[in-house]
Image (cartoon, helix red, strand yellow):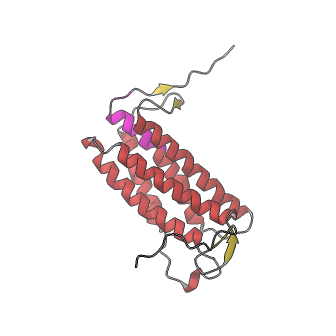
Amino acid sequence: MALKIYTKTGDAGNTSLIGGTKVPKNHIRIESYGTVDELNSFIGLLSDSIISFAALQPLRENLKEIQDRLFTIGSSLACDPDKEPLMKIPDLQKNDVEWLEQYIDSMQSALPVMKHFILPGGHTAISTAHITRCVCRRAERLCVAMQANNLFVDPLVIQYLNRLSDYLFVVARYIGHQLQIEEIAWKPRIH
């Protein structure tokens, strides 16, 4: 018999962290890894939105790698920090941040200098990259809030999410550049 997807254990508004500790479903730790899960889903959508563009296939491979790192981050955030040392949870490494920086620099070198703020849009893939960037920033803010409330979060998780949001901003510009779509300059209304 197949394993059922529903357990009914969360019907009272609580859930368990990895390690068994029960917390309310609105606990900031649950919010943080739920937002990382949302971010991972948007990265999948972003990858799917560029599937038909041959020039962007290497980017799709990078996005798949990032999804793997986000599962690692989700595991870290979903774990009871008091019990984590006793478990084998995948870990994030400093070279994961450096990997993002290398790709940011590589894409950036192909882009024109940004002389103005740009509005998200011009193509569905560009807009999806910007939405993904915004969700990433929210995940980062939640992790910073955990840290501010003395709840353990690996500082490398915050650093990775910060760099990932930068990466996603550059990805949005890079997609537009590869698809030859002009950036939409923000022209502030001044009276």
Q: Depth check: 156 or 180 in front?
A: 180
Q: Which residue is drawn at 69% across and 62% down?
A: 26
The answer, for residue 158, to whether it is visible in the render is no
Total numbered labels: 0
Across and down, in percent, residue 181 comes to: 37, 28
Across and down, in percent, residue 141 comes to: 64, 54
- Place residue 1 in its image quadrant: bottom left
Pick the quarter of the image with the C terminus.
Answer: top right
Taking the view exactly as shown, the residue that stands out farthest to the left is: 54
Give the main secondary structure, helix, strand or loop, of the magenta stretch.
helix
**In this picture, is 27 found above or below 82?**
above
Q: Depth check: 111 or 75 in front?
A: 75
Q: Which residue is drawn at 59% across and 68% down?
A: 77
Q: Depth check: 9 or 115 in front?
A: 9
Across and down, in percent, residue 107 comes to: 37, 44
Is residue 183 inside the magenta stretch? no
Taking the view exactly as shown, the residue that stands out farthest to the bottom is: 86
Q: Residue at x 42, y 36 (%)?
A: 124
Across and down, in percent, residue 16 comes to: 62, 75
Is residue 177 inside the magenta stretch? yes
Q: Residue at x 50, y 77 (%)?
A: 89
Q: Depth check: 91 or 129 in front?
A: 129
The answer, for residue 103, to whether it is visible in the render is yes
The part of the chain drawn in magenta is 169-181
